[in-house]
Image (cartoon, rainbow, N blue to C red):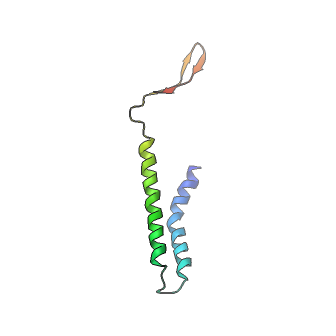
Amino acid sequence: MGVLIELFFFALPFLAYLVWWRVAGRKPGHEPSRRLVMLAAIGVACGVAAAVYYGLERSLEGDTYVPARMERGGIVRGTSR
């Protein structure tokens, strides 16, 4: 699964260029509208902001991880405090 994600992120700039080329109509000097560019920039900014927010919310600061352990021949599940 991790390899697929890495391949996706590698191909993302190429896919973005392909979409841009298609929207531009493949004519030299013909560019997508300003509105489309602004919407794309807002979408990218929202995605980055969401990723940063998620990363900060899921941090493990203050949490203590207790690994699983063996007791009386059985495995006792670890906890996160």
**Which residue appears farthest toward the top when viewing the image?**
72
Tell how many labels: 0
Identity of the residue drawn at 51% across and 59% down: 9
Apparent side of residue 18 relative to residue 46 in the rendered image (left or right): right
Front residue (pair 53, 72): 53
Q: Is residue 15 above or below residue 56?
A: below
Nearer to the camera, 44 or 12: 44
Residue 34: x and y in percent read 44, 77
Q: Quadrant of residue 81?
A: top left
Residue reaching furthest to the left: 62
- Residue visible at 49% across and 85% down in the picture: 30
Going by the picture, which residue comes out furthest to the bottom? 28
- Residue 12 coordinates in the image, percent (x, y): 52, 64
Q: Nearer the viewer, residue 46 or 4?
A: 46
Reply above or below: 57 against 77. below
Residue 76 sits in which quadrant? top right
Residue 25 place in picture, x, y as percent: 55, 83
Q: Position of residue 10 (x, y in %)?
A: 51, 61
Give the residue at x 46% y 47%. Answer: 54
Q: Residue at x 43, y 61 (%)?
A: 45
- Residue 77 higher or lower than 59, as above or below: above
